[in-house]
Amino acid sequence: MVDVTVIGAGVIGCAVARELTRYCLDVCVVEKETDVCEGTSKANSGIVHAGFDAKPGTLKAALNVKGCGMIPELARTLDFAYRNNEALVLCFDEAQLGGLRELYDRGIANGVEGLELLTPEQVREAEPALNDVAGALLARTSGIVCPFEMTIAFAENACDNGAVFRFDTTVKGITRDGSLYRILTDKGSFESRYIVNAAGVYADTIHNMVCEDKMKITPRRGEYYLLDKEVGNTVKRTIFQLPTKMGKGVLVTPTAHGNLMVGPSADNIDDKENTATTSGGLASVKERAGLSVSGIPFGKTITNFSGLRAVGETDDFIIKESAENFIDAAGIESPGLTSAPAIAGYIADIIVKKDGLHPRSDFIETRKGVKHFAALSREEQNELIRNDPAYGNIVCRCETVTEGEIRDAIDRTLGAKTLDGVKRRTRAGMGRCQAGFCTPKTMALIAEKYGIPLDSVRKN
């Protein structure tokens, strides 16, 4: 038996688990995949949204602004990549300048600081690559983050503070037995006093096992282009267009690690596992992005990918105690990544107040990530190699990832078990050749660690 079971090891589930380990609670995270960050959290824009888009008075608005304010400090204490690069929302037609003013007013109502309406001349000076515009909204608190590193940081810190992660474990049913929930999985059953439903696009499936009022989550697929670091400075800020009911539109943005990213499309689909990219979806992204920046060097694309957003029926986050001791964190679409640490605090408060808990004195607040060799000075690199010669052996040439980093990623808390697990912790395989060079050596290191034959190593 455990105190709290968190279902889903995406950014929300991992952030919740970390927050709950601040208290004397036995926390278990159940995840159907082999690793954290295997769903929506691995395939998104990586944007830290300022909070001007959400309707005032909603959970989205409040938790977006609060989360945006929390992430810079969390990036320092938990050691994940973050840049405060600001954002621009473009308006191309003078007749729509009222929509820009409405976004500004909404942001002020939500408590967003650093907003400013810019003239066409100011926009051109700020971002010379942009097409002609009628005006723009500047959001100074907006930023970019590495979503993999952020999710993994929450998970590792939660684990270091006592949370238990059960991977490759699918929830098949939930029943209520007195004051406890019995959770039936494909790996056996166990009991829990509380359940936090952070199952992403499957949050409706979990909710409907427990609650009489049924829920529906619609997967919304977004397709992206990821371009080489050679063109990562095409724009400095995240470039948005005026949003529509389908989202914040196609953006053009640098990434936290220096690539250029363009996307996403927005298509509601039925299949919760369909992350295929399509010629039609990618063509629409390319066309719409061209409104903001002409001549985007799509010939420098190194990969395409798609992700699924979990869209609820309320146009707001669904975060509430939907049944006794059963807490939903459902419909967490954009700005869910930004809101994650605030959502975690919101959910923890529900449980803490019910149980009358007080924080632990021995909570470990900080975490250090994999030491990225390429980010170090030459002196630091040489010192690292002197202490461990494996750091002098380059495995991934595109991203300058060493054997030492890969061994660290495999050996550390919640260590990588797959090629994708190594990739998200070290960036080995994320570069120009997309793992064409480093795959064999990475496979050999995984096989050595787990004592398995080479042909048993999996991509994911």
Image: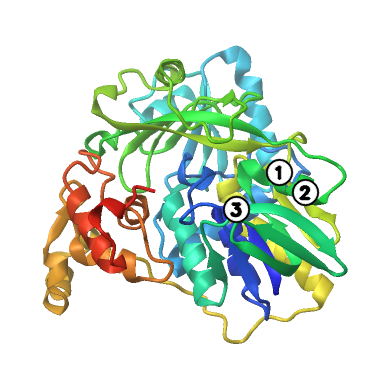
Mark 3: secondary structure: loop
> Viewer-proximal residue, 210 or 116?
210
Q: Which residue is mark 2?
A: 209
- How packed mark 1 is, by other alpha carbons closer than 10 Å (few <14, some 14-19, many 20 or more), is some
Q: Which residue is mark 3?
A: 170
As measured in the structure, the alpha-carbon distance from the residue carrying label 1 to the one carrying label 3 is 12 Å
Name the spot of residue 392 as percent of width and height, x first: 11, 65
Query: Of callouts 1 and 3, which one flags the residue occurring earlier in the amino acid sequence?
Result: 3
Mark 1 and mark 2 in contact? Answer it, CB < 8 Å: yes
Name the spot of residue 19 as percent of width and height, x first: 62, 68
- Where, by quadrant of the figure, is residue 24 drawn? bottom right
At x 29%, y 37%, the residue is 232
Q: Is residue 308 visible?
A: yes
Mark 2: secondary structure: helix
Amino acid identity at mark 2: Met
- Where, by quadrant of the figure, is residue 452 drawn? bottom left
Q: Is residue 305 left or right of residue 205?
A: left
Q: Is residue 33 left or right of residue 445?
A: right
Name the spot of residue 23 as percent of width and height, x first: 67, 78
When the figure is inspected, residue 112 is found, relative to residue 411, above or below; the finding is above
When the figure is inspected, residue 389 is found, relative to residue 96, above or below; the finding is below
As measured in the structure, the alpha-carbon distance from the residue carrying label 3 to the one carrying label 2 is 13 Å
Q: Which residue is mark 1?
A: 205
Q: Is residue 346 visible?
A: no
- How packed mark 2 is, by other alpha carbons closer than 10 Å (few <14, some 14-19, many 20 or more), is some
When the figure is inspected, residue 372 is found, relative to residue 244, above or below; the finding is below
Amino acid identity at mark 1: Thr
How many numbered discs sit on the rendered protein?
A: 3
Name the spot of residue 54 as percent of width and height, x first: 68, 38
